[in-house]
């Protein structure tokens, strides 16, 4: 699916105009008019928690926090009251917009999603952070302005969205920074976990004792698994560690550490980046900040056995995602090269094992069928699922590093094979490069109509894309649902969780659409899954990799199986419970 940012046509809610968002159309209904942003309402965060560690508050009784939020489409507007005497700095980062506040106590809070473009809000220790699901540039992805209400109170207005641009307007009195230091207490606030908020792909253990292949000295295989520990061949020859060599390419940063013979490394992943413990080297304290969008900074810390290298990344890293490492032989001399590629779009492209290439069987269901005498009888039937490979024929879909119609069909066939072997009756809306009808709207309606009575679920598979100017902001997987059926949202959640768990891909979360035709016109639980971005240089590599597509197919198939056996179906019947119920 070609995805463009949803731009809204709206004026300010205040007496001082600060600009408007350009009118545009949703990516789902061509020609749809802009939608006005509704009035602001106070945030309600019943699940908010107060961090245990917060810096001492200023002497002033003034407080900063409790923002008011309005969200429509992809744009989220956040408004803070500015007490008299307060000063602030804005820092756009790869993970969101940070406010450093002086002259007022920042009310501590941690709350989950405030809107489509603010996935978390964290405040305390003199800072407030609006965490976004896409990176912010100095003037892209956000806009800031100040305005004075009729009461004389001054407010800070922040608009965030993938299609928003402008950065800090002329009315902003605060500073705008490119990087900013983080105090230990503030980092505690930023890193405090939200209960149940970690995506499945982030629940992989950070231990270095995971069963991964040993590091290889052959750098010719781009699908090589990340190596969490290894050693450089040869007799020990301790040497001083030079500054890392940095290479930058769109969407990815490469860090190279030159290691002497006999040295060893161990890599640990975490919420703030990578920690590399080195032995057989020496190092002087060094650091650098603001290296690239993917690398916020690096630090060398000497230890008794060698040195610790900390790479502060823009996003969370796990043992399976956000980075990749290889140990390469010397290019010259005797120093081997530990090469680390950093990108939040890097997903798990390791091959599935033989035991992983299957889905647990799904029990048949009892169904009522008319007999020749118009009476009803029951018989065991396989649960039926419709899989819709998006686009086809003259409609290529998104075109970037891959062509959407080709990848969606490839994945759909893999999903069919997995589910068919598990006892599911799979119906494909297309099994070749063709469209169902030359008129697009009719084509979409025909796909949705294939969910005939007796069909349990409908799942449409797509590839995402963003325009060239915004391409680096789009990566990862997301699943859409529509309130066409009471169980559609549950189906979408099961597929999204399973997909992230199998691929380690960046979790863009669940999206609710009122406009997607294949969902809106379906009469059964339906979901549309976007398996990656053809427009992103790194995510596009994922979509070109057969191992990644295997993992995508397995994630979708396992999510569908979970829906079938748990009763997230058109009739709400569990496939596992059906035979037992029929015996009674």
Image (spheres, rainbow, N blue to C red):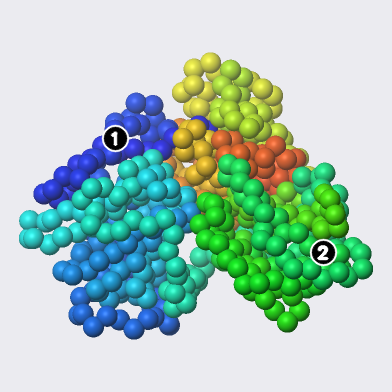
Query: What is the number of the mark on residue 155?
Result: none
Is 280 situated left or right of 63 in this image? Answer: right
Q: Residue 235 in the image: x percent, y percent? A: 92, 68
Rendering quarter of residue 264: bottom right
In this rendered view, identify the residue nearer to me: 474 or 111. Answer: 474
Q: Is residue 530 above or below residue 14?
A: above
Q: At numbered mark 1, what does the secondary structure look like: helix, strand or loop?
A: loop
Residue underneath mark 1: 22
Please indicate, yes or no, whether residue 359 appears anywhere in the rendered image: yes
Q: Which residue is mark 2?
A: 260
Q: Exactly how many numbered labels are in the figure?
A: 2
Coordinates of residue 53 in the picture (x, y in percent)? 43, 82
Instruction: Give the farthest residue toward the right.
Output: 235
Q: Residue at x 69, y 27 (%)?
A: 431
Q: Is residue 119 visible in this depiction of the protein?
A: no
Residue at image point 82% right, 44% down: 220
Measure the C-alpha gap from mark 1 to mark 2.
Answer: 56 Å
In this rendering, position of residue 85 left or right of residue 466? left
Q: x%, y% of residue 508?
A: 51, 50
Foreground residue among 147 and 450? 147
Callout in the foreground (1, 2): 2
Q: If the image is split into quadrants, where does the C terminus sit?
A: bottom right
Local secondary structure at mark 2: loop
**Residue 43 appears in which quarter of the rendering?**
bottom left
Q: Earlier in the sequence, mark 1 or mark 2?
A: 1
Q: Report crowding for label 2: few under 14, some 14 to 19, many 20 or more residues within 10 A (C-alpha).
A: many
The reply to whether discs 1 and 2 touch (Cβ–Cβ < 8 Å) is no
Q: Residue drawn 50% across and 27% down?
A: 444
Name the residue located 39 percent from the left edge and 30 percent from the top edge.
Answer: 29
297 or 222, nearer to the observer: 297
Estimate how packed mark 1 is, as few (under 14), some (14 to 19) or many (20 or more) residues with alpha carbons within 10 Å.
Answer: some
């Amino acid at each position: 699916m070609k995805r463009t940012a949803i731009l809204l046509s709206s004026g300010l809610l205040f007496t001082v105009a600060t600009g408007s968002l350009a009118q545009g159309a949703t990516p789902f209904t061509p020609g749809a008019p802009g939608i006005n942003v509704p009035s602001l309402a106070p945030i309600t965060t019943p699940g908010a928690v107060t961090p245990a560690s917060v810096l001492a508050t200023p002497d002033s009784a003034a407080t900063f926090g409790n923002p008011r939020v309005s969200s429509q489409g992809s744009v989220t507007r956040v408004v803070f009251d500015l007490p008299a005497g307060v000063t602030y700095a804005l820092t756009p980062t790869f993970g969101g917009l940070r406010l450093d506040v002086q002259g007022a106590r920042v009310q501590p809070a941690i709350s989950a999603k405030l809107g489509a473009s603010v996935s978390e809000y964290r405040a305390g220790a003199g800072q407030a952070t609006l965490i976004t699901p896409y990176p912010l540039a100095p003037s892209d992805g956000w806009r800031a302005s100040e305005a004075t209400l009729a009461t004389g109170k001054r407010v800070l207005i922040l608009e965030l969205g993938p299609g928003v641009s402008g950065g800090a307007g002329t009315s902003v009195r605060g500073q705008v920074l490119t990087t900013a230091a983080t105090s230990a207490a503030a980092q505690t606030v930023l890193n405090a976990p939200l209960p149940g908020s970690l995506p499945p792909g982030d629940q992989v253990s950070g231990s270095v004792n995971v069963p991964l292949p040993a590091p290889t000295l052959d750098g010719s295989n781009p699908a090589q698994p990340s190596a969490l520990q290894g050693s450089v061949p040869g007799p020990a020859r301790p040497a001083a560690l030079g500054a890392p060599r940095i290479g930058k390419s769109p969407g990815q940063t490469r860090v190279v550490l030159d290691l002497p013979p006999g040295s060893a490394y161990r890599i640990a992943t975490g919420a703030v980046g990578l920690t590399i413990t080195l032995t057989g080297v020496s190092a002087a304290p060094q650091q650098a900040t603001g290296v690239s969008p993917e690398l916020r900074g690096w630090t060398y810390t000497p230890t008794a056995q060698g040195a610790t290298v900390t790479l502060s990344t823009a996003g969370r890293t796990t043992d399976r995602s956000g980075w990749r490492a290889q140990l390469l032989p010397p290019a010259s001399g005797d120093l081997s090269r530990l090469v680390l590629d950093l990108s939040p779009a890097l997903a798990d492209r390791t091959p599935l094992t033989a035991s992983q290439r299957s889905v647990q069987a799904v029990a048949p269901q009892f169904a009522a069928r008319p007999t020749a005498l118009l009476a009803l009888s029951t018989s065991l039937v396989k649960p039926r699922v419709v899989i819709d490979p998006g686009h086809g024929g003259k409609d290529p879909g998104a075109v970037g590093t891959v062509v959407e119609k080709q990848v969606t069909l490839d994945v759909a066939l893999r999903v069919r094979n997995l589910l068919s072997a598990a006892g599911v009756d799979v119906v494909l809306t297309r099994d070749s490069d063709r469209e169902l009808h030359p008129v697009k709207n009719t084509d979409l309606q025909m796909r949705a109509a294939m969910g005939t009575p007796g069909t349990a679920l409908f799942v449409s598979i797509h590839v995402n894309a963003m325009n060239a100017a915004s391409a680096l902001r789009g990566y990862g997987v997301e699943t859409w649902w529509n309130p066409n059926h009471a169980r559609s949202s549950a189906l979408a959640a099961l597929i999204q969780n399973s997909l992230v768990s199998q691929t380690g891909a960046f979790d863009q979360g669940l999206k609710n659409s009122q406009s997607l035709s294949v969902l809106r016109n379906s009469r059964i639980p339906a979901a549309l899954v976007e398996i990656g971005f053809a427009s992103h240089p790194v995510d596009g590599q994922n979509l070109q990799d057969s191992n990644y597509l295997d993992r995508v197919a397995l994630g979708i198939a396992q999510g569908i199986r979970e829906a079938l056996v748990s009763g997230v179906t058109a009739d709400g019947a569990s496939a596992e419970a059906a035979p037992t119920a029929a015996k009674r």
